[in-house]
Image (cartoon, rainbow, N blue to C red):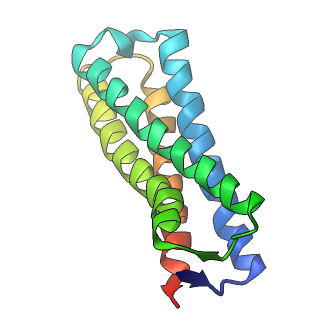
Amino acid sequence: MYESKISNAKWIAYDLPGNLGWIMFRVALVLCFTKKPEIIGDKVIWVLLLLNLLCAAAMIVGIVELISERIQKLDRILPKKRLYRGFGSLTFGGLAGTVISLSALAVALMNGLTGAAYLGVLCAGGLLCFVFGGLLLKEYKKR
């Protein structure tokens, strides 16, 4: 079992930007596929955006797990498996999403493609999710 003795104020300070991150990431990803900016026409960016779908899926797994933990009132004492399925998935999804999105952004900028702003939002969202999900994950210590 792992336990966090984080204060409520610190929890909120980490939780809000972390939530903003995964929401930004998902919204930007949806916009890339629905608005179909010029970046979608680039094959490398297309593949990277498809990989970002996996990152978004990892984030969703983490969110579903954390909601499940809240429902079961396991907020700050978690088994290792649930800790990593929740905060680990968010942290991993955020890190991978940041790296993949930065790669796509670099390709878009090098090729002068429009729609790079969506990729910038993907980067920012992934980074927020990674940093603040990771900070919450780090707060849990073995009992």
Taking 119 as reference, is 115 above or below it? Answer: above
Kindly tell me whether residue 115 is visible in this rendering. Answer: yes
Determine whether, in the image, residue 4 is placed left or right of residue 107.
Answer: right
Residue 120, how many percent across, how many down? 46, 36
Q: Residue at x 33, y 40 (%)?
A: 102
Q: Residue at x 66, y 76 (%)?
A: 76
Taking 14 as reference, is 93 above or below it? Answer: above
Residue 27, how many percent across, how many down? 60, 30
Taking 48 as reference, is 123 above or below it? Answer: below
**Who is closer to the viewer here, 58 or 142?**
142
Q: Residue at x 30, y 28 (%)?
A: 48
Q: Residue furthest bottom?
A: 143
**Who is closer to the viewer here, 15 or 60?**
60
Residue 39, how many percent across, how many down? 36, 16
Kindly tell me whether residue 130 is visible in this rendering. Answer: no
Taking 121 as reference, is 43 above or below it? Answer: above
Residue 99, how many percent across, how many down? 31, 46
Q: How many marks?
A: 0
Q: Residue at x 31, y 31 (%)?
A: 104
Determine whether, in the image, residue 51 is placed left or right of residue 44.
Answer: right
